[in-house]
Amino acid sequence: MTERHHDPHAASATGMERAAAYAEAYAAAQPDPGHRVVTVELEAREFDWEFVPGVVTRAWGFNGTVPGPTLEATVGDVLEIRLANRLPEPTVVHWHGLRIPAAMDGTETVQRPVGPGETFTYRFRLPDAGTFWYHSHFNETVQLERGLYGALVVRAPGEPVFDAERTLVLDDVELEKNGQVKPPGWWVESHDGREGSTRLVNGKQEPTIRMAAGQIERWRIVNAASARYVLFSVGGRPFRILGTDGGLISAPVTVTEILLPAADRAEIAVGPFAEGETLRIESLPFDRGSFRAHRKPERFATVEVGAAAPSRARLPERLREIEPLVTGPVTPNREVRLGFGLGLKHGVEFNINREQHHRAEPVRVGELQVWDVLNRSPVHHPFHLHGFFFQVLEVNGRPPAYLSWEDTVNVPAFGSVRIAWLPDDRPGEWMYHCHILEHHAAGMMAHFEVVR
Ligand SMILES: [Cu+2]
C-alpha cells in the first residue's frame, strides 16, 4: 500500500522559486579553509537482505545494505550526496538533525520528489558535531520500514578519546511467514505505529558485540524504528551519557538506562567490563500508551567481553559549554497541541492544533521561540523539529536533568514539554511533526516558514 497523503497545507512555492533556493544553497555550500568536500554516491534500490540469518527479505535501502553506509565527516566539511533513485517509486532523503539550508532538508515541501530513474544532489556544509541520521521522507511507513535509513557521524577536533567507537542503529521490522516485510496495517497500527517483532542492530537480528575487557567505548545510538521507544540498557550496568541529538552535553551523566523515542539519538560511554561477562543490550519495559504493551525486557543485542586490552580512554569532567537560551521567567509564544480524532482513512487521525497537516504561523529569524508542546492524547509522541536544535526547558513543568541540544523530544501522554530555540538565518519552509511514522502520515505535523 502506497500512502500518498494529500497535504493541502504544504508550501505553495513555485518550481522556479524552489529551483532558485536550491541553486543558492548549493553554491553557498563551501568547505571551511583546510576542509574538504566529502562526496558520496547513494543509490536507493531494492535488494535481498538477511535481517534474520537464513531468511531472505526483499529490502529497500541505500547502496545495498541496511542501514545504508555510515557517512563520516568533520565539522566544516561539505557533504555532497548524489542520490540515484532505482526504486519503483519516488523518494527524498531527509538529513535528520542537520542545521542546513531549507532547500537541502529533503522533504516534499522543499523539493520535487526524486522519481524512479532520476538523480538529485544534496550539498551542504556540516555545522555541528554529533550523531545524525538520514532517511527517506517519502511514503515513510513503507520506505523506512524496508530499510531506507543510515547514520551520519560528524566529528570535531578535541573530542574525548575512547578505546573504540561504535554506531548502533536500532530498528525493528515485522516479517511475514514468507520472510517479507509486512505491509502497513490499520487501526492498531495507526494508533501505536508499527512495532516489528524482529529487533535489529545495524540491520541484523539481535547480533553479538565483542568488547575487550578493561576498555571504555563510545557508542553512538540511533533509534531508527518507525514507532518503538527503546528504554536502552546494557545489562543494567551504569554508563555515561556523553551527548544527545545535537552533540555533546556539558558533562557526562551516569545512568543505568536512557529513553530513546523513535528518531532519538544518544552518545554514551560504556564499560569497562570484566573478561567473560555477557551483557544484554535490551529495551526495558516501558509504557508509552500503546495498545501493545512492553511488559518484559526485549533484547536487541548481546555483549560478550573477551580478553583484556589496555585502555587509553580519558573521559573529561567537562565536555563542552552549552549556553542556556532562557535564564529567567519566560512567556511562551506558541502552543503546539498534539491531538487526535477518529476517521475512516487511518482509524486514528492524529493532528496538530486540531488540523491534520497543520499550517502554522511563520517565525522570524533572530526571534527567540518558546513553545509549549502540549500532548492532548493518551499516547506519548516524539516531537521532531526539522533543521534547528532546541533546548528543553521543562517536561511536565519540571526542568530536565541536564541541558542539551535536541531535535527530537518525547512529549508524555497528556503531558507537556516547553522548548526554546532561536531561528538563525536560514529562511524557508520547515516543519515539525511526530516521529511515529504512522502518526506523521496521518497528519500529526505542521508546516511553517522561517522569514527574515
Ligand atoms: Cu505520535
Image (cartoon, helix red, strand yellow):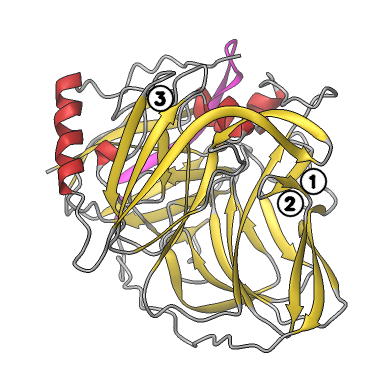
Coordinates of residue 110 in the picture (x, y in percent): 28, 30
Question: Which quarter of the figure is the N terminus placed in?
Answer: top right
Residue at (80, 27) in percent of width and height: 179
| Residue receiving disc 3 | 357
> What span is colored magenta in the figure?
331-349
Q: Earlier in the sequence, mark 1 or mark 3?
A: 1
| Residue receiving disc 2 | 286
196 is higher (above) or lower (below) than 418 = above
Q: In the image, 278: left or right of 433?
A: right
Whether residue 289 appears in this view of the structure is no
Give, as a three-letter code, the residue at label 2. Answer: Phe
Q: Is residue 345 magenta?
A: yes
Whether residue 181 appears in this view of the structure is yes
Q: Main secondary structure of the magenta part?
A: strand
| Residue receiving disc 1 | 294
Q: Earlier in the sequence, mark 2 or mark 1?
A: 2
Disc 3, SS: loop
Please identify the quarter of the rendering in which residue 420 is found.
Answer: bottom left
The residue lying toward the viewer, choosing from 407 and 104, is 104
Give, as a three-letter code, the residue at label 1. Answer: His
Q: In the image, 117: left or right of 143?
A: left
Disc 1 residue crowd, few under 14, some 14–19, many 20+, Cα 10 Å: some
Q: In the image, 91: left or right of 50?
A: left
| Distance Cα–Cα, label 2 vs label 1 | 6 Å
2 is higher (above) or lower (below) than 308 = above
Disc 1, SS: loop
The residue lying toward the viewer, choosing from 18 and 397, is 18
Coordinates of residue 260 in the picture (x, y in percent): 61, 54
Give, as a three-letter code, the residue at label 3. Answer: His
